[in-house]
Amino acid sequence: MKEWRKVKLGSLLAESKVASEKPDTDKRLRVRLNMLGVEKRPKSNDKEGATKYYIRKAGQFIYGKQNLHKGAFGIIPEELDGYESSSDIPTFDVDESCYPEWIYYFFKKGHFYAKLEVLAKGVGSKRIQPRQIFELDIYLPDKEEQRKVLNEIKKAEIKNDKLLGELNFQEENLTQLRKSILNDAVQGKLTAQWRTLNPNVEPANELLKRISVSKKVYAQGNKIKNGQYRNSISGEIPFEIPPSWVWSEFRYIYNDIEAGKSPKCLPYPAEDDQWGVIKISAISWGIFQEQENKKLPINVIPFVEKEIKAGDFILTRANTTELVARSVIVIENVRSKLLLNDKTLRVTISEFINKEYINISNNSPYARLYYSKVASGTSDSMKNVSRRDIDLMSFPIPPFEEQNEIVKKVKKLQLYCDKIANEIRINKKYLEKLMQSFLCDLLGLENTFSYKDEFLENLKKQSSRKVKYDSKTTFMELIDLLKVHGKLHAEDLWKMSKYFDDKNISESIDKFYSDLKKKVEIDRTIKEVVNEKGYLELV
């Protein structure tokens, strides 16, 4: 490697700009994130003439200007030869002295592409332009040496893919094991031995009798006959259950069900002392995700009666086909000031039923199948279930003591599964780290920089610009500073802001840019001054 020459990437790449004379919406391509390659883009109804398209050729290097730092790059395969993309997805002919794959691994090694976010950190356009990557250094041995190295990489990738495939297989088996645990739980298989050892527990029909009396709603008619509670299920019985169990529709075992509200919120999470409305993703993954919320605007009065509390049983009536009506029980240490949205329901389960058992049942495979069948909506990415669909969901109800035993056993088994899942994740990370180490050892590291290093370097340089610094307006919010000064250079804004700390420059810059990025991209309260690079003003 020491003998390899170092050249500019721009000396190896020439941007291809062969305009398409007859653009074809069925021959468009796109570059997937996370280095997942180049593929045909689904056909869409593009407005004719709105965007100029260019012909792309097999073997060209391609990347997405907005997402290069997210792994959107690759080599165009033979099957996409002649396809098109806009100038936002440029392609490049690679010099004869270099294999296209050499360029690909240049970006891949050590996740170098992710470090290029510095090139897109400007507060204006977020794209990474070809001229910017052209300035990068790249090691370039002769083609014979390149081929030897690329062959070694291919061998390593084959081994890596085999090991990764085994880990993925283990993950799939673990997913099936989790489903099997839930299936066995709701069918009484987990507690078969327990029932043998506890034959005298009160049967579930007595539980439901007490529920009906306590609700004073279902204590007459055909729900109770000759002192016995009949299975309150209108459809077919999904599967056989133990004799001491009984089937019941959801409506017969809850006391109350309520939805939240969904006012227009800000597109970022609320701070711990601010009100936020949860998103449906807060319920999607089996454990309540309190960070999945949107900030309630200060001009909207919080609907405090919909505040989420620890122990709440919540389900969502809108989600993907797989996740619609998924439920969670809110964690004990949940933060305050989180509100239900109109797509989420809080259900108050009867005191005679263990809500954790209902949560297990509601997330089990047979329940998932039910909800997927009754869900409405044309798109698989957003299905809806009605209140009536939820009411008619049928649960197999065991005796109360057995419900508690099932919950205990499921929790124990899921902990084992969590441990295995964590080991798989660790092995995957180790495998990725090993592969990246191998690539870096083979290919070297030409460019080691970060945006902080670059920013600090610029601070050291003398500048001809007029410094606009006012010691009387320091330690202020960014918005307030721009209200006072009209416009400021980013450096001056930083030095006068509340984030400036000359004893901890690196952390100070991190906090400053984090707030600035939010105000530019999300709040849209600050913008870059037109034709004055580096200067900022209020929108």
Image (spheres, rainbow, N blue to C red):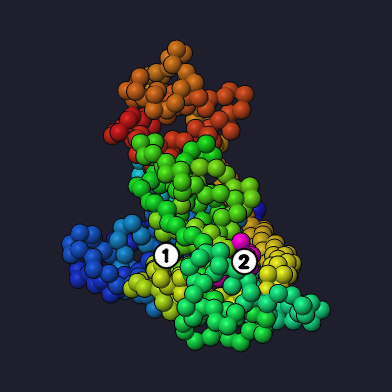
Q: Amino acid at mark 2?
A: Ile
Q: Farthest right residue?
A: 197
Q: Farthest top residue?
A: 472
Q: Which quarter of the image is occupied by the N terminus?
A: bottom right
Which one is earlier in the sequence, the residue at label 1 or at label 2? 1
Q: 10 Å neighbourhood of mark 1: few (<14), some, or many (≥20)? A: many
Q: Position of residue 433 (x, y in %)?
A: 67, 59
Majority SS type along the magenta span: helix
Task: Determine the residue positioned at 51% across, 39% down.
Answer: 271
| Rendered view: 159 above or below 484 | below
- 391 lies left or right of 22: right
| Rendered view: 408 above or below 331 | below
Magenta-drawn stretch contains 361: yes
Disc nearest the viewer among 1 and 2 = 2
Task: Determine the residue positioned at 62% across, 65% down.
Answer: 352
Q: CA distance from mark 1 to mark 2?
A: 25 Å
Q: Secondary structure at mark 1?
A: strand
Q: Which residue is mark 2?
A: 353
Q: Farthest front residue?
A: 226
Residue 474 in sight from this viewpoint: yes
Q: Which quarter of the image is occupied by the C terminus?
A: top left
Magenta-drawn stretch contains 3: no
Q: Position of residue 56 (x, y in %)?
A: 33, 68
- 72 lies left or right of 263: right
Q: Which residue range is magenta in the image?
A: 351-362
Task: Determine the residue positioned at 40% across, 23% down.
Answer: 481
Q: 10 Å neighbourhood of mark 2: few (<14), some, or many (≥20)? A: many
Q: Which residue is mark 1?
A: 318
Say which quarter of the image contains residue 150. Answer: bottom right
